Amino acid sequence: MRKYIYWGLPIVWMGVIFYSSAQPYEDQDIKPLLSDTIDLSFLIPLFDWVSFTYHHSEVSVDALGIAGFIEFFVRKGAHFTVFFILACLFIIAIVKSIEINYKRTLFISFLLTVSYAGVDEFHQGFTANRTPYVGDVLLDAFGAATACLLFFWWIIKFGYRTTKTE
């Protein structure tokens, strides 16, 4: 029974993700904090040449202002990081509770993480001023894949063993 405690880690983390996804954009907007706290104008010449489209919107310093431009990358970095952590927690739960080989551990962890990323984006569709976007699921999948690759590197360096606990 003790081995199933490890499944609490990804479940709690999914709750944190769900809570965050349930907040309207205005409650998560960090542009005022960035603008009021730090003079970011020194970054404008470094990034004024960057311009691309993401989810039908231009991402550039001209379109978003420097604070909005920085916020875009903070938010997308959060997608990567949050689902990187979730994949790591799934890996830990599987290793600690199920005796399977590392390929299946990685596959199941990746599949569970990306599945939840899809559910999370779907859930955002019901939140005020939030929209689901498959590009965000791809960012989430990239975070999960990075966690799995790191775990694979760990296996190569230190070996793999399942831990049987009661």
Image (cartoon, helix red, strand yellow):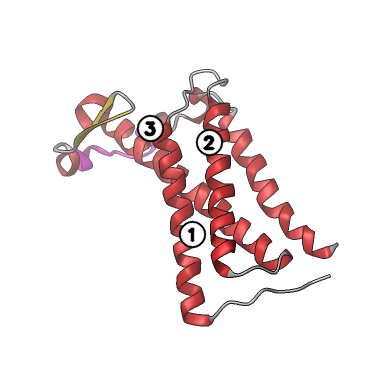
Q: What residue type is labelled 3?
A: Asp
**Identity, as a three-letter code, of the amino acid under mark 2:** Gly
Extreme-top residue of the structure: 128
Which mark sits nearer the N-terminus, 2 or 1? 2
Tell me the residue that label 1 is attached to: 147
Give the prevailing secondary structure in the magenta stretch: helix
- Residue 85, how many percent across, how many down? 55, 54
Mark 1, residues whose alpha carbon is within 10 Å: few (<14), some, or many (≥20)?
Answer: many
The residue pinned by badge 3 equals: 36
- Could you tell me the amino acid type at mark 1? Ala
- The quarter of the image holding the N terminus is bottom right
User: Closer to us: mark 1 or mark 3?
Assistant: 1
Residue at 38% x, 32% y: name it. Answer: 36
Point out residue 48 in the picture as x, y percentages from the top left corner.
16, 36
Look at the image and give the residue range highlighted in magenta. 33-44
Residue at which label 2 appears? 118
Counting residues from the start of the chain, the first of labels 1 and 3 encountered is 3
